[in-house]
């Protein structure tokens, strides 16, 4: 989910997605399994990869945030989307009201802040993507919000649409899931994928955010879409 608090700031032009997404998916799969984190001061952790910082009171949450961030960044970086700013994931007991009552994480565009709830609070959702909450899904939550924090600086326009931002963040989220979780989630959220760009709407996202994610990922996988479509979204030629 993304929380817009002010107008977009100036973003550099999109560098384009390199056609090596399959490699990125493999890397993401490998990297999401183990992570050790260094606690540099009380409640502040440095992840072993990409220099990601995590602020958390529970080291287990910090480890998962690092794993999710690394999986997300493996995909993004391999696709040519380097983080423009340092990534700091904050595990916070409450999200800002603007995030809405159903959000478990949020990216605050104006402040460039990546926020997620602690795992113990996330459990109250019971399911995410229609699958019972577990640590794998918690890592995916971190991956999703980190994806927002990276792609936001690669749009060629100052204020991309909600559907554009969520399409990209969900594609990264699904692409960075371990294979068995991805299979489980897609089975729990059946569908053929969005039939066309006009079906990918803000309204659909707001009413069915989980289905939106699954449908977006299937749309992305369809021949002719993939990297080319991601580029169109970033350039403002699609999902405006
Ligand atoms: Zn989102």
Image (spheres, rainbow, N blue to C red):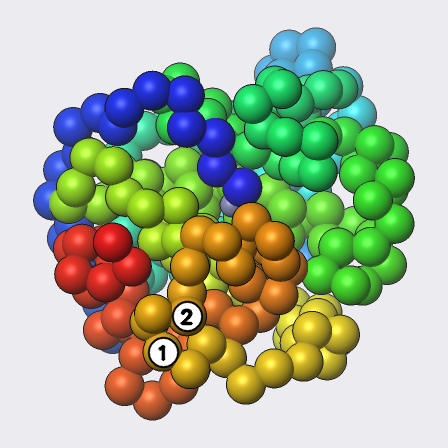
Tell me the distance, in whole angstroms, between the alpha carbons under discs 1 and 2.
Answer: 6 Å
Residue 196: give its label.
Answer: 1
Which residue, as the protein is rendered here, is positioned at the far left? 13
**Residue 136 sits above or below residue 46 on the image:** below
Residue 99, picture quadrant: top right
Q: Please identify the quadrant where the C terminus is shown.
A: bottom left
Q: Residues within 10 Å of mark 2 (few under 14, many from 20)?
A: some
Image quarter (top left, top right, bottom left or bottom right) of the N terminus: top right
**Where residue 215 appears, x then y in whole percent?**
53, 72
Q: Position of residue 149 (x, y in %)?
A: 41, 37
What SS does tag 2 mark? helix
Q: Residue at x 46, y 26 (%)?
A: 108
Residue 181 visible here: yes
Q: Residue at x 41, y 70 (%)?
A: 199
The reply to whether callout 1 and callout 2 are in contact (CB within 8 Å) is yes
- Res 32 quadrant in image: bottom right
* Residue at point 36%, 78% (across, down): 196
Q: Is mark 1 within 8 Å of ligand 1?
A: no
Depicted 215 relative to depicted 40: above or below: below
Q: Residue 57: x percent and y percent? A: 76, 19
Residue drawn at x 40%, y 53% as measured from the top left: 163
Q: Which residue is mark 2?
A: 199
Q: In the visual, does 27 lie left or right of 232?
A: right
- Measured as percent of width and height from the top left, residue 165 is found at 38, 48
Which one is in front, 236 or 86? 236
């Amino acid at each position: 989910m993304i929380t817009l608090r002010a107008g977009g700031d100036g973003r550099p032009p999109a560098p384009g997605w390199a056609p090596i997404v399959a490699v990125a998916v493999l890397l993401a799969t490998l990297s999401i399994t183990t992570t050790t984190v260094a606690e540099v001061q009380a409640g502040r952790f440095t992840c072993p990869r990409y220099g990601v910082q995590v602020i958390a009171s529970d080291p287990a949450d910090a480890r998962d945030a690092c794993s999710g961030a690394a999986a997300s960044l493996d995909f993004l970086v391999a696709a040519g989307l380097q983080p423009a700013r340092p990534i700091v994931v904050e595990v916070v007991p409450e999200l800002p009201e603007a995030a809405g009552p159903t959000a478990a994480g949020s990216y605050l565009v104006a402040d460039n802040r990546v926020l997620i709830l602690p795992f113990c609070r996330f459990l109250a959702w019971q399911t995410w993507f229609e699958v019972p909450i577990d640590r794998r899904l918690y890592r995916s939550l971190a991956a999703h919000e980190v994806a927002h924090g990276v792609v936001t600086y690669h749009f060629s326009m100052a204020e991309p649409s909600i559907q554009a931002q969520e399409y990209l963040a969900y594609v990264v989220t699904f692409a960075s899931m371990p294979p068995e979780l991805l299979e489980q989630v897609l089975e729990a959220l059946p569908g053929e994928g969005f039939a066309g760009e006009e079906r990918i709407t803000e309204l659909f996202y707001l009413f069915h955010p989980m289905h939106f994610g699954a449908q977006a990922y299937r749309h992305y996988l369809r021949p002719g879409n993939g990297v080319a479509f991601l580029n169109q979204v970033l350039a403002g030629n699609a999902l405006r």
